[in-house]
Amino acid sequence: MTLEILACSRCAAEYFPRPMRCAACGGRHFDTQAIHTAEVVAVTQAHRVPEGCAYRYLVELAGGRGVPVIAASPQLLQVGAHVLVDQDDHGAVFIPANPANTHP
């Protein structure tokens, strides 16, 4: 499932996740914009994760025109890198494992 950023139909303000109303203009209708890649803004390591969980890093991403999105990653990523991003059927955002995305 592709990650979708929502843009207010009235003023184009972008959001993730979906708000009830646009904070900028009060609009209630939103258009979706599919996001396939995003820029890594910050990375933190989760030191206690459930047994068997491969996603040991939480990553702040800038999607769309800078909309902040938090994603899970199985690998350490470099700040400033552009990475593939996806969303599962339950709404969880994650970065698929990709050797090209690893931190040197």
Image: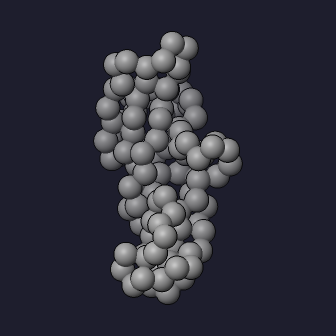
Whole-percent x and y of residue 21?
46, 75
Could you tell me which quadrant the C terminus lies in? Answer: top left
Residue 47 showing in the rendered view = yes
Whole-percent x and y of residue 41?
33, 47
Residue shown at 59% from the left, 74% from the top: 31
Whole-percent x and y of residue 34?
61, 61
Judge whether 92 appears above or below 2 on screen.
above
Q: Quadrant of residue 56?
A: top left
Whole-percent x and y of residue 20?
49, 70
- Coloring scheme used: one colour
Judge whether 100 appears above or below 51 on screen.
below
The count of marks equals 0
Q: For the view shown, which residue lies furthest in the top direction?
A: 51
Residue 40 showing in the rendered view = no
Judge whether 21 appears above or below 104 on screen.
below
Residue shown at 37% from the left, 75% from the top: 23
Q: For the view shown, which residue lies furthest in the front direction?
A: 20
Left or right: residue 42 versus residue 1 is left
Residue shown at 49% from the left, 43% from the top: 83
Residue shown at 56% from the left, 79% from the top: 29
